[in-house]
Image (spheres, rainbow, N blue to C red):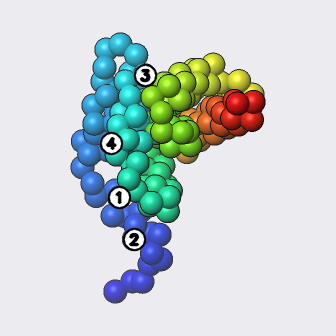
């Protein structure tokens, strides 16, 4: 028997999953197949993910997002390889991840969550600096996931700053 590193075993295991499973995950359970605004529909799945994680401990929430990020890299890399397209429109797990992370940073209030959803989508679509650099320079599944992670951080940070200013002047 040939010994292999644990990361090799994990990589080999991931290659054994059926391609349909990778597509199911990459499209956020089919949200990416929406004929209109698939990214926005994928981000709506992120609202459900964030809501589901409300009762979870902070550590479990971070672990869940780390797992979603890793699965997103794997699934989107698989779809890229199968389609030959660098950023397939059907891949929306990145929007699901980004929207969920943004909302998880904000106060649990419908107004803040609506602002978070809109801010994330704005930064995801417009891709201002430094998000644009990640989008332009990074390729593959990691590139797909990282520019949305950056959009989530920027959107969440700006809204948290706004929340702090509002609280300060109350």
Q: Are marks 2 and 4 in contact (CB under 8 Å)?
A: no
Toward the viewer: 132 or 67? 67
Percent from the top left, x then y, of residue 94?
47, 37
Toward the viewer: 42 or 21? 42
Circle 3 residue: 40
Q: Earlier in the sequence, mark 3 or mark 2?
A: 2
Circle 4 crowding by C-alpha within 10 Å: few under 14, some 14–19, many from 20: many
Which labelled disc corresponds to residue 14? 1
| Helix, strand or loop for disc 1 | helix
Circle 2 residue: 9
Residue at the far top in the pictured view: 36
Residue found 42% across the figure and 83% down from its top: 3
Q: Earlier in the sequence, mark 3 or mark 4?
A: 4
Tell me the mark number nearer the camera, choosing from 3 and 4.
Answer: 3
Toward the viewer: 102 or 82? 102
Percent from the top left, x then y, of residue 140?
53, 41
Q: Earlier in the sequence, mark 2 or mark 4?
A: 2
Indicate left or right for 35 with 143 as reference: left
Residue found 31% across the figure and 28% down from its top: 31
Q: CA distance from mark 1 to mark 2?
A: 9 Å
Residue at the far front in the pictured view: 170
Q: CA distance from mark 3 to mark 2?
A: 35 Å
Q: Earlier in the sequence, mark 1 or mark 2?
A: 2
Q: Quadrant of residue 15?
A: bottom left
Q: CA distance from mark 3 to mark 1?
A: 28 Å
Q: Earlier in the sequence, mark 4 or mark 1?
A: 1
Tell me the mark number nearer the camera, choosing from 2 and 4.
Answer: 4
Percent from the top left, x then y, of residue 44?
38, 28
| Helix, strand or loop for disc 2 | helix
> Does 77 sit above or below residue 6?
above
Q: CA distance from mark 2 to mark 4?
A: 21 Å
Circle 4 residue: 25
């Amino acid at each position: 028997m040939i010994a292999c590193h644990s990361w090799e075993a994990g990589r080999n295991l991931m290659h054994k999953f059926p391609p349909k499973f990778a597509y199911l995950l990459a499209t956020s359970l089919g949200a990416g197949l929406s004929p209109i605004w698939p990214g926005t529909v994928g981000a709506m799945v992120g609202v459900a993910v964030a809501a589901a994680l409300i009762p979870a401990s902070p550590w479990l929430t971070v672990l869940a997002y780390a797992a979603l990020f890793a699965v997103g890299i794997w699934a989107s890399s698989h779809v890229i390889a199968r389609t030959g397209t660098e950023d397939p429109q059907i891949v929306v797990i990145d929007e699901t991840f980004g929207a969920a992370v943004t909302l998880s940073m904000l106060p649990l209030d419908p107004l803040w969550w609506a602002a978070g959803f809109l801010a994330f989508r704005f930064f995801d679509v417009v891709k201002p600096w430094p998000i644009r650099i990640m989008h332009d320079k990074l390729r593959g599944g990691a590139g797909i996931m990282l520019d949305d992670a950056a959009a989530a951080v920027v959107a969440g940070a700006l809204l948290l700053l706004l929340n702090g200013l509002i609280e300060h002047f109350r």
